[in-house]
Image: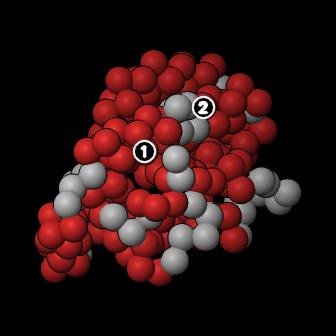
Amino acid sequence: MKSITFEHDAPFWHLIAVRVFENGEATLPALFDALTQRAGELGLPIAFGDRKSISWAVICRLFLLFNTKVPGLDRKGYGRMIAAFKRVFTPGRFVSLGMKRIVANITYPSSPHRTMKESVADTFLANGLNVTDKYDGAAWDEIILNKSLADPAMMSLCDQVVTPPPGLWNEVNALYAANRPGYLSRLTFNMRNWLVS
């Protein structure tokens, strides 16, 4: 079955986002705990684990998913995808902001010679963290970034955080193919997304 058939269906992208979010809420807390522990071992005043961390992890996973599974997504499909994602995130405008930051960091990496996936992990790191009460100003920012990027354990955890769940794409494609809404339902869903976004 070719998943590409559904690239213009907003309900398909909505289902993808819902499933990635559900998976993230179930699996990410353990990774966030490990990241927070590693940050403490490095003496960094940062922690992970709240809604902000989950939202950044999920948008990074969604970016990697669509970028690897449907790299040639056209403007129409991309617009429907973004509109569908906005129905899953609160606030919805976070989706556009998150995608722009990810793309900007891939285009202009925070550190030289970073792969696309490493740049996505860097974006999560920089945006998904929260500072603790030991953080006493912007002088920490460069230290946090440099120590984190130089630490293989920290970056390995960030890589795991942004990696989409294995098998989810095929699972959602099969589910959607078996339960695809009719043409009028899809059209209504697409129009509702267009009016809201």
Say whether residue 21 is visible.
Answer: no
Above or below residue 131? Residue 49 is above
Image quadrant of residue 189?
bottom left
Residue that carries the numbered disc 1 in the rendered image: 173
Q: Residues within 10 Å of mark 2 (few under 14, many from 20)?
A: some
1 or 2: mark nearer the eye: 1
Q: Is 112 on the left or on the right of 155, as rendered?
A: right
Give the percent coordinates (x, y) of residue 174.
41, 39
**Cα distance, mark 1 to mark 2?**
23 Å
The amino acid beneath tag 2 is: Gln
The amino acid beneath tag 1 is: Asn
Above or below residue 140? Residue 19 is above
Q: Which mark is residue 160?
A: 2
Give the percent coordinates (x, y) of residue 196.
16, 74
Q: Which mark is residue 63?
A: none
Give the percent coordinates (x, y) of residue 21.
34, 39
Task: Residue at 43%, 27% (x, y): give it.
Answer: 28
Image quadrant of residue 162?
top right
SS category of the residue bearing label 1: helix
Nearest to the observer: residue 111 or residue 158 = 158
Judged from this view, the residue extending furthest toward the right is 113
Task: Residue at 41%, 60% (x, y): give it.
Answer: 6
Task: Residue at 55%, 26% (x, y): give it.
Answer: 35
Nearest to the observer: residue 45 or residue 81 = 81
Does the residue at mark 1 contact the one at mark 2 (Cβ under 8 Å)? no
Lower position in the chain sequence, tag 1 or tag 2: 2
Nearest to the observer: residue 87 or residue 36 = 87
